[in-house]
Image (tube, rainbow, N blue to C red):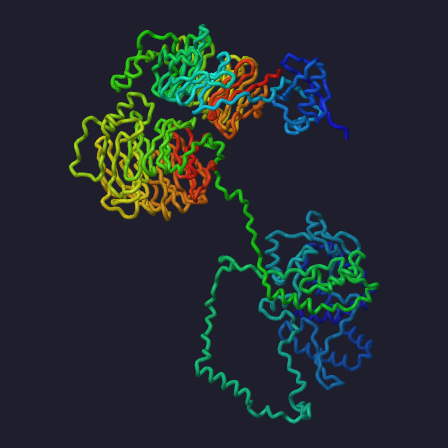
Amino acid sequence: MAPASHPAVFTTQSPYPLPPQMFMIPATWSRYQLSQLVNKALSLAKPVPFDFLLRGDLLKSSLADWCTQNAVGEEETLEIEYIESVLPPQKMSDLPHDDWVSAVSCQLEQRFLTASYDGQLRAFDYSQNQTWSGPIHGAAITSFCIVPSTSADSHLIATASHDLTAQLTEITLEATQKAKPLASLHLHTAPLSSVAANSSGSQILTASWDGLVGLWDTVVPETDEVPEPAAGDRKKRRKIEENKPKRKAPLMVLKSHTARVSGAVFNDEKTAYSCGFDSTVRSWDLEHGLCANTITSSERPFLSLSLAPSSAPFTVLATSTDRTISQYDFRDPHPLASLTLTHPATPSCIVRSPSHPHQILSGAYDGAARIWDLRSVKGATPVASFKPWDGDKKILGVDWKNGGIVGVAGEGGLGVWKVGEGA
Amino acid sequence: MAALPRSKKRKQSSEDVVAAVEAPAFSAPVQSLEMLSDDEGPEETASDDGQVDEFPEIDGASDSEEEALGDDEDEEDEDEETDKEDFEEADSDDSLDRDIFPKPKTIISDITGQPKRVYPEIEPDYDSDSSTEDTQNRVGDVPMHWYDDLPHVGYDMDGKKVLRPARGDELDKFLSTVEDPSAWTSAFDKTAQMDRPLSAEELDIIRRLYANEVPDAGYNPYEPMTEWFTGKGKEEIMPLSAAPEPKRRWVPSKWEKQKVMKIVRAIRQGRIISSKPKTASKLDFYSIWSEPSTSHAPPLPAPKPRLPTNSESYNPPEEYLPSEAERAEWEALDPEDRERDYLPTKHSALRLVPAYDRFIKERFSRQLDLYLAPRIQRVKLNIDPSTLIPKLPSPQSLKPFPNYKSLKFTHSSRARCISISPDGAWVISGDEGGVVSLWEVNVGREVKRWKFEGKIGALEWCPRLDVSYFVVGVEETLHFVIPPNVPSSIFLLTQSLLAPATLPPAPETPSPVKWVTPPTSSWSPDTAILTVHLPPSSGLPKQITWHRRGDYMASVSSGGTQGGVWMHQITRRHSQAPFKKIRGAVQLVLFHPLKPHFFVATQQYVRIYNLSEQKLLKTLTPGIKWISSMDVHPSGDHLIVGGYDRKLCWFDLELSDKPYKILRYHTRAIRSLAFHPTYPLFASSSDDGAIQVFHSRVYNDLMTDPLIVPLKILRGHTVKDGLGVLQVRWCARQPWLVSGGADGTVGLWCS
């Protein structure tokens, strides 16, 4: 019998469009042959690997297999979308830590900044050397963010900790210089879960287990805005008197969550999103401090959230303990999860690609970081995945820098990986 | 008077034949007469009679003529004639019936010399049948109502219509009966459509029928008996057989006598009891269909013998014929082991087939088989197994429930006890090495660690939300510990609660339990802020349980007096033993979530006490050999009790002392049970390393039984030294389960 072949039309959103034309594709072909076909048809000078999406499903096996799995007849014309394939991520370096690393940031030039459960903030350069470290909190730091600022040599860091406060700290990343705590943010009565700064660096959001979201400005006050607790041990206070940060009160308290708030992010200067254990994702009007919109999901306690990649504005992605990442669009009047990415273990953190309009990276408790393409809406298979450490050491934080540098923080320290974005 | 002419007429019947030539002439006037006088029926008959009567001379002539004709009839006829004449004479004054029918004459036969009866000859003449004599209507045998609306009633011999005789009205009828003396003996003749007088014979028959006599006048029921073999001169003189008469004819039978004597003896000895006189009226009626038929199955038909196959044919196909090797192999085998007990053999013709040599043997073995191997009908239970499974909702519809292990926390030795903070954010787990770890539920990162001396027997978080501390039970001591990172207000309140500046007044009765607060200077987050020393030799506290208000706490120690149960009041810093004496070793205690009730589980019983009234309310008997665990539903109306013998009993406390339901799902001993405080869930853990999660919906109305649905078996703990999962606890606000195993891991199971 002659090998069966499928009529197919290729579409793409990548910068390599094919002329609209029908191809007869042998059913036995899989990704590699299709990629070669596209390369030949385009007669590219340098071969570009492509991945292929059939009805939102990433093609992993041959066309015939896919057709039998999805009950597609031989005569039907397949619409194949091709995307630049993600090269297998490559490990760049492994930076072990003494304690679990809860968060990582790669946003600084030539530096990785990590926050750890021992309350320390550490900085590493690209040659795997620890260039700076400093104790910020007496308890575990759960999250931190770099507040964008204009000064070149010093950076303003906001940290959230188990000790019920967030802190604004100025660091210079020089080995001799100690961190300079500017202000401690006093609002919450339970450990904080996340902190985020807006793009202009003027405001900070903190999310806490007590169900509150605090909105703060980054201006360091002259005097304590919140009085000291009346009772307490005087000796201890005196010890750290000289380097004591100013006690700062919030601009606004966003109250609406009924359980722990696990994540809060800015969308723009005026709106913010938060998610919590009460299975809701909320959008906030920051001018009035009101909850503008609430998306309630059933029995899906959210662990963290992130803005969706640039292709989907007003959309958030949230990880939940039922092992899914859900996408919610706030423009939708009756939002349901428009996309659900299922994981084999609890996904703990999520970050969007800084440059790619469709990709996100998630880290899970089984120790695997996965890159997902949101066009592959079936959502069962990540585009690529890698394990920074052996065993099932949990991943607690991920960050993705422009240029394909990915920092993965977790039980095993910090792993730095290079994620190719097609080129 | 009528009889005489009638007999004459009969005698002259032959004369009629003689006059047959004149018959047309004779009948014509009769016809015309009839035609003319319709209404004169009786008259006519009378005239007929009269006519008949007018021929006596012809009668006599015919007689003589007859005599002349029948000379071959010889004297007999003459006798007859004479007899008849005598008879007639005798008759004339005798009763009427005698002379209606032709009378037989009794004559002496010449041959036998015996008297015999001779009847008058019946001449088969044309006219011998008198029934046609005076029939004018020859319409035939048709229903006469066909002529009902016609003027005639039939046709005569000439084909002329016989007109319907005029019928008078009732008055005419009456007049005719008055005038005509014979009217009452007449009957309506359908063919003639008129009344006809009945003949004397007919009247005689009617009379006899009325008198219940034989209708035939000539029948004599009292005929004289003819003797053939008896009587004078007819005795058999010679015997038929010459054999001498046997002796038994006159000798009494000896055997009969013996038989009779046997019966007599039996009657005397009482072996034979004369049967009671049968009462015929005592019939025992019963309905044979009322009682069910016997449960015994009817005997089974014998199994049919196997039908012969192709290979048993006298001329089997070639492929059935054994080769030499096969034949040798068959013969070498023991007859018992042979697959078949014959070898296919080919015969060229059916007549060459020898007699079947194994017939007897085969028949015998079949009989033996039927006799010695009784058959029974095997009743195949044809039940669809799916119908036996109770109808339960699908677990998918009962979400959320924990279904996967989200993370695990590892201890260096057995994680015997765990507790979750009332806000559901922190877990403390204690192991047998004396280490208590505090960690976040969702991350699993140990935040703080305490080290105590000896095994951790129990630990429990205080359920109050305005203070934050937990109690750790180690050997003979209870430590009260404040976790780190609590807000200062809560911290201060907790401090003032556990170590108040002014101690409450000491109770009147000194207690063997000592409450000790270390001096303020030595306080540190690593040590206990308050220590309760249980009486010496009380052993390891096995269980600590809190009252929901968080002021009272009960602890159960493995040793000591009073069952090792101590009730501690935090605000008064006082401990007391609630029981002076208690039967059995106390395994567990529990506070009722709503009422002042107290559950005490001993090895086999659960007793419920009312603490305010200080009396025993109820004793539950779960039927478990050794109770290991117990938990009360948040509503307080239901209790689950687990045992080391794998049973899990659900008690409805409103209902009964006996379990409402007994579940045996675990393959090893149950170690721990826990109800979720808000979700309708409970979990049980066992030494088989599995945790089973159940949906348990309790309804508010008392009519509906609780719904218990097994949801999920969580596997992931390894069994170590025969111990599996030692304790399970639920997170307060989420459907998450925390389990501590003997393998040192504490797992968090998320939905």
Residue B520 appears in which quarter of the rendering? top left
Task: Pick whichever, B496 or B18, lies toward us.
Answer: B496
Q: Position of residue B735 (x, y in %)?
A: 42, 30
* Number of dots carrying numbers: 0
Task: Pick whichever, B558 or A75, lies toward us.
Answer: B558
The image shows residue A151, relative to residue B95, as above or below, that is above
The image shows residue A97, relative to residue B412, as above or below, that is above
The image shows residue A71, relative to residue B315, as above or below, that is above
Whether residue B704 is visible, yes or no, is no
Q: Is residue B674 left or right of residue B607?
A: right
Q: Position of residue A246 (x, y in %)?
A: 33, 11
Q: Quadrant of the N terminus of chain B?
A: bottom right
Residue A302 appears in which quarter of the rendering? top left
Q: Is residue B152 left or right of residue B377?
A: right
Residue B541 appears in which quarter of the rendering? top left
Task: Pick whichever, A154 or B151, lies toward us.
Answer: A154
Q: Position of residue B590 (x, y in %)?
A: 31, 38
Q: Is residue A144 left or right of residue B82?
A: left
Q: Residue at x 36, y 40 (%)?
A: B630
Q: Position of residue B579 (x, y in %)?
A: 24, 43
Whether residue B139 is visible, yes or no, is yes
Task: Pick whichever, B730 or B82, lies toward us.
Answer: B730
The image shows residue B674, relative to residue A376, as above or below, that is below
Judged from this view, the residue extending furthest toward the top is: A150
Judged from this view, the residue extending furthest toward the front is: A176
